Image (tube, grey):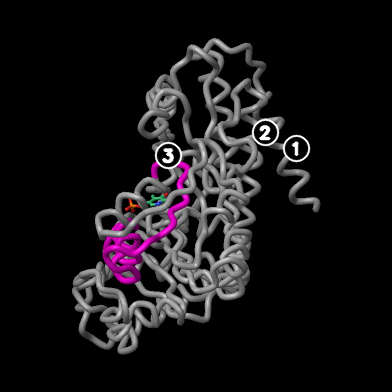
Amino acid sequence: MIRKTRLFTPGPTPLLPAAQFAMAAADMHHRTPEFRALYQKVLAQLRVFVGTGSDVLLLSSSGTGAMEAAVSNLTSPGERVLVLTAGKFGERWVALAKAFGCEVDLVEAPYGETFDLAAVRKALKPEHRAIFVQATETSTAVRHDVEALAKLRNEVAPGTLLVVDGITGLGTTHFDVDGWGIDILIGGSQKAVMIPPGLAYLSVSDKAWVAMEKSKNPRYYFDLRKERKNAVKGESAYTPAVALIAALGAALDYIAGQAGGDLEKGRIALVDNAQVNAAATRAGLVALGFTLFAPTAPAAAATAVAVPEGMDSSEVVKALKTRFASVIANGQGEMKGKIFRVAHLGFFDFLDTIALLGAMEHIAKDTLKLPVKYGQAVAAAQQVYSDAVKS
Ligand SMILES: *Cc1c(COP(=O)(O)O)cnc(C)c1O
């Protein structure tokens, strides 16, 4: 039988064909009226996609570049910051903050769990320059309650900046950026916006712009003030990833097109889509005998499941690739071999979910020797879908 390559990984995610065509056709110099028109259009679309009235900036880097920009632009050496960490990407905030000389206080949650809000309340002090957190911790597929964290910040330490890594949160979670007071919200191109790696984008609040003026950490390529000055003119500070920006424009057009041309409604549909596919996947995999790795706070960006005791999740990853040319993610770091992760963010629809669950029935039966009845996972997912479209 022939096999079709499919990505079910939480970044990079499957590419939107229209975005690939736009990319291939983007033969353009970046200091021309054509590019300025494209750049201004994409920045305006990004404001709607992120859902903010503030500036949204684009950087030619992977998502971590924008994380570094948030740290270097907002902090000074010796300043205290609070990092909330529950996985590999939370640990990246810790490493970044330390690299820029911050004194890091921590609230940790075990892998597979989210934070105890009472612990955050106890740890958070008005002298913290910023809180750094993920909206969804992709390494464990846990969702953190950004709204509750923002409320807590507003109550306990209103002067503290709230910086959210929404790299897999955007497009899978509903945010009220300005209403909650998120100061920086970061996204990445290879996640929900259906294009290849290479771009990061971030919203920046007025409060963050003011704070930036006092920050003493060094910054050059990621100097957000310089990026903002250039963006006003429809340009980026340095040579941007022109082809990816063209692709991003096409992807945001597609998302708008899913809701009759209304990008805000399209964004909501994209988030709801991820949520339904995540719920269907959870139901299907549990029906096959897997255990959810993050049962109390599952993300819609991805689903992490533990394989039964004594089994190796690498076998599932390998079998899916060999038999169906489909790629899912193993656990990261010490979670490797214990869990696997399936993505729902971006260009995935319900048919993709059904296909994956159908393949997983074979893998569970043949590779893991679980007692599978064909249709078991698919039936559970069908029920979730049916309930979701009725309501
Ligand atoms: C993918 C991801 C990143 C890192 O992005 P890069 O593009 O690899 O730099 C950061 N945070 C989260 C939550 C992610 O999922």
Circle 3 packing at 10 Å, graded few (<14), some (14-19), many (20+), is some
Q: For residue 172, which quarter of the picture?
A: bottom right
Q: Amino acid at mark 3?
A: Arg
Left or right, 21 with reference to 357: left
Q: Which residues are magenta?
A: 61-88
Q: Do labels 2 and 1 touch, CB within 8 Å?
A: yes
Badge 1 density bin: few <14, some 14–19, many ≥20, Cα 10 Å: few
Residue receiving disc 3: 6
**Numbered mark located on residue 383 in the image:** 1
For residue 203, above or below residue 1: below
In the picture, which quadrant includes the N terminus?
top left
User: Residue 70: x, y in percent?
Assistant: 35, 66
Q: Residue 296, located in which quarter of the rendered image? A: top right
Residue positioned 53% across, 36% down in the render: 112
Q: Is residue 76 visible?
A: yes
Q: Residue at x 57, y 48 (%)?
A: 143
Q: Is residue 84 magenta?
A: yes
- Label 2 – label 1 distance at C-alpha: 9 Å
Where does label 2 land, which residue? 283
x 22%, y 78%: residue: 237
Count of numbered circles on the image: 3
Q: Indicate if the residue with disc 3 has its beta carbon within 8 Å of ligand 1.
A: no
Residue 241 spot, x, y in % from top left = 25, 67
Q: Are marks 3 and 1 in contact (CB under 8 Å)?
A: no
Residue type for callout 2: Ala
